[in-house]
């Protein structure tokens, strides 16, 4: 049974997103004094005692969006209201009643579910009388709270639970796969999400920077739950002009960290930029399985073959030569499901564990095929190898001296692991330790790679 839906609505700048984060217990929505920051629907599962419900944050009602996205925002608000079992109408006790509050109330008159009036910003008991003027709306209950000062949370949750359906469902099913969709602006990330969800789940627009928050969209497929995380388009740091953009970039990075697989989106008509390299570097740094997703391929396939574009990507990202490449047209849904299937396969690879015996046999054969070169007049040796973790696969080699192994040989071992073990398309963490010491003496092979001389980037076209 689906979870009951509790939807937060109100005019701009009454603290809806602060309330949302407060009830969710973590920072999900961007909170900023700028009006109209929230555009898409944001959701989070909430547990209150032994009961569960899903909380939804929405954009401000009655604002004219500066990027002419008002109609899109309104559709998202209405979609949330259509699914609601309970509405939290949030008002600002500090600034008092405003004309836009009246407009929100008029809109809520047609809602057939209970509506609670939540007077936010009642930071002290002395401020609570200021909230009494909102009784004029004639709503069932007025609840003074302060998300900032953590006041009134228990009372609010108690009133919410009283009004939710008795058959309130169970916790949401365990998530099988978390996908982070990242890339530059206007690469089609939100279009991909909507195609996957088969609904207008997030706003799609030609306006650069439409998506601001990182939005979790739960999708049920074949009895499995997938969470697709839509992120804001990333820009160069020097181009970030506001706090909103800064927080958007920060949340995109956080989405990469909490994802099982990262989809690195590229627009087929544009060459690889410094931003793309920074994102790929962040994915590599966090050892996340990834897929290069080349979107809008229908616009370029007559001019270029997939193999040519793949070669281009391999030259630009030599450290990610194991990352698979997918060519899609998200707008038409072409190859969208194939990308998800590939992501599930990568997650399976990253979750695999190899027995110590099999792993040592692979290392022994690798040493026999190509011995490590002498260093400091000593022969590097590997005594024992074991996998200590998965997601990412983490392999520890006990040696007679980690500093005896040079970077090229470590890359050779890493390639051997990828070829011989079930980690062909995912990153591998490799640690070297001295057999007689406890401290880690080397990090991953990637961390030991020498800086390459800057070369002229391969080009297929000009921007």
Image (spheres, grey):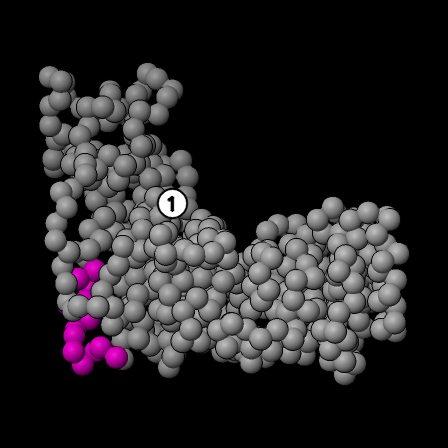
The one of 61 and 443 positioned closer to us in this rendering: 61
The one of 388 and 31 positioned closer to us in this rendering: 31
Q: At which x and y percent is residue 211? A: 48, 66
Q: Which residue is mark 1?
A: 286
Magenta region = 299-313
In magenta stretch: residue 456: no
The one of 357 and 143 positioned closer to us in this rendering: 143
| Residue at position x 22%, y 65% in the image | 271
| Residue at position x 43%, y 66% in the image | 209
| Any part of residue 198 in sight | yes
| Any part of residue 324 in sight | no
Q: At which x and y percent is residue 251? A: 48, 53
In magenta stretch: residue 312: yes
Left or right of 389, for residue 268: left
Count the labels in the image: 1
Left or right of 348, for residue 251: right
The one of 312 and 97 positioned closer to us in this rendering: 97
Q: At which x and y percent is residue 278? A: 31, 51
Q: Mark 1, residues whose alpha carbon is within 10 Å: few (<14), some, or many (≥20)?
A: some
């Amino acid at each position: 049974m689906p979870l009951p839906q509790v939807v937060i609505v109100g005019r701009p700048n009454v603290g809806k997103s602060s309330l949302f984060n407060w009830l969710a217990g973590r920072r999900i929505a961007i909170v900023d004094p700028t009006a109209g920051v929230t555009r898409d629907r944001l959701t989070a599962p909430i547990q209150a005692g032994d009961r569960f419900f899903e909380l939804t944050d929405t954009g401000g009602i009655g604002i004219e969006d500066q990027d002419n996205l008002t109609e899109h925002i309104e559709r998202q608000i209405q979609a949330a209201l259509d699914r609601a079992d309970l509405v939290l109408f949030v008002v600002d006790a500090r600034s008092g009643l405003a004309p836009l509050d009246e407009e929100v109330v008029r809109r809520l008159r047609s809602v057939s579910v209970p509506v609670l009036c939540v007077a936010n910003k009642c930071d002290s008991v002395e401020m609570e009388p200021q909230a009494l003027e909102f009784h004029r709306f004639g709503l069932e209950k007025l609840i003074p709270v302060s998300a900032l000062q953590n006041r009134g949370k228990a009372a609010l949750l108690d009133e919410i639970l009283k009004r939710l359906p008795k058959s309130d469902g169970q916790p949401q099913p365990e998530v099988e796969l978390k996908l982070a969709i990242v890339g530059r602006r206007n690469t089609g990330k939100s279009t991909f999400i909507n195609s996957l969800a088969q609904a207008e789940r997030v706003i799609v627009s030609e306006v650069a920077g439409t998506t601001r928050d990182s939005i979790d969209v739960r999708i049920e497929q074949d009895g499995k739950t997938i969470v697709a995380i839509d992120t804001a388009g990333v820009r160069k740091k020097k181009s970030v002009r506001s706090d909103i953009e800064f927080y958007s970039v920060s949340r995109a990075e956080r989405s990469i960290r909490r994802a099982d697989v990262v989809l690195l989106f590229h627009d087929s008509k544009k060459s690889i930029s410094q931003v793309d390299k920074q994102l790929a570097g962040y994915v590599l740094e966090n050892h996340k399985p990834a897929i290069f997703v080349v979107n809008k391929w229908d616009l370029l396939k007559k001019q270029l073959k997939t193999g040519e574009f793949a070669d281009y990507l391999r030259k630009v990202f030599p450290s990610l030569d194991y990352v698979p490449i997918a060519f899609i047209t998200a707008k038409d849904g072409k190859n969208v499901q194939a990308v998800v299937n590939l992501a599930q396969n990568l997650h399976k690879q990253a979750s695999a564990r190899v027995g110590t015996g099999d792993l040592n046999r692979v290392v022994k054969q690798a040493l026999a095929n190509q011995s490590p070169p002498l260093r400091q007049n000593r022969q590097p040796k590997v005594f024992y190898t074991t996998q200590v973790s998965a997601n990412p696969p983490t392999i520890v080699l006990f040696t007679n001296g980690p500093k005896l192994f040079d970077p090229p040989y470590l890359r050779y071992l890493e390639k051997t692991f990828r070829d011989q073990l079930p980690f062909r398309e995912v990153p591998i963490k490799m640690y070297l330790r001295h057999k007689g010491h406890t401290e880690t003496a080397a990090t991953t092979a990637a961390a030991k790679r020498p800086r390459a001389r800057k070369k002229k980037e391969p080009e297929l076209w000009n921007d």
